Image: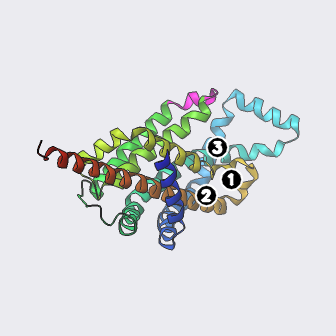
Amino acid sequence: MNDLLRSFGRALTSALHPRMLWLTFVPFAAAALVWGVLLWFSWQTLTGATRTWLESWTFTTTLYGLFDWLGFSSLHAVVAPFIVIALAIPLIVVTVLLLIATLSMPAVIRHLSARQFSGLEMRRGGTWYGSLAHALWTTLICLVLLIVTVPLWLVPPFFALIPPLLWGWLTYRVMTYDALALHATSAERRALVRRHRLPLLLIGVASGLLGSLPTLLWASSVWLIVLFPVVTAATIWIYAFILVFSALWFGNYCLRALQRMRAEEHGARAAATLPY
């Protein structure tokens, strides 16, 4: 627990460094550009298809009747856009995560290596292509699990447990590989993950919970749909900042654990060579 808290504090301090703040801008700009263009040209099509799909459900008629009874008839027009946004947000998060993993994470680890772990030998057990392949494969598995578990989201308490666990697992798997790619061998990375699986998963879940904060911007009021471009841009940047912070948290914890594991192995080898 001390290592978790110590790594959290160091990550928070490092996240405010100008270089780290700059690293949030690159994935933010790329994700905002890609999703801005996609949603701009497909918005009417997506909302129209969603509205048609909603009108085919008996439940929607009941829901609209409830809105009318409560005096919120104007909400009819925002249900379809709100659903489109709710489905787009997880895809935006995944996009930002992949961009952070492939573009920002190497710079984060070099920053930590130069400032805090300059004496830690680089054994280069991972590559950029390996990181990309690992991130894509892990993301695919997470999306499949996301789709499979959607029905459980309607059942308490699963709706509050499943999303953080899924995002936590995804973040932990992607960030751990990237945090150790430069310094650890493949064998060291696997050994360290086995030894620290629970703390790493806890960091991932905590990062997933932090990542749910931008969604509160949308949940606070459906009227924010009117400000969709501005709120979406703010949301993407907040995600980018949280994920860079998560990268620093994972990097601090993993490199410290690797340093300690090598010291233990060196001590064990030294003890084995001592004469009896």
Kindly identify the residue that appears in the image at 67 percent across and 44 percent down. Answer: 80
For residue 217, the mark is 1
Left or right: 181, with 97 as reference point: left
The secondary structure type at the circle numbered 2 is helix
Amino acid marked by disc 2? Thr
Query: Which residue bears the numbered disc 3?
Result: 83
Query: Which residue bears the numbered disc 2?
Result: 235
CB under 8 Å between discs 1 and 3: no
Amino acid marked by disc 3? Ile
Q: Earlier in the sequence, mark 2 or mark 3?
A: 3
Kindly identify the residue that appears in the image at 49 percent across and 34 percent down. Answer: 147
Q: Earlier in the sequence, mark 1 or mark 3?
A: 3
Left or right: 234, with 179 as reference point: right
Kindly identify the residue that appears in the image at 48 percent across and 30 percent down. Answer: 148
Q: CA distance from mark 1 to mark 3?
A: 15 Å
* Number of other residues with Cα within 10 Å of mark 2, as a class: few under 14, some 14 to 19, many 20 or more: many
Residue 38 visible in image: no
For residue 275, the mark is none
Q: CA distance from mark 2 to mark 3?
A: 17 Å
The secondary structure type at the circle numbered 3 is helix
Range of magenta residues:
149-157
Colour scheme in use:
rainbow
Q: Earlier in the sequence, mark 2 or mark 1?
A: 1
Left or right: 117, with 39 as reference point: left
- Residue 231 x/y as whole percent: 66, 59
The one nearer the camera, 41 or 10, is 10
Kindly identify the residue that appears in the image at 72 percent across and 55 percent down. Answer: 224
CB under 8 Å between discs 2 and 1: yes
Amino acid marked by disc 1? Leu
Does the magenta segment cover residue 240?
Answer: no
Task: Please determine whether, in this image, residue 68 is positioned above or below residue 12.
Answer: above
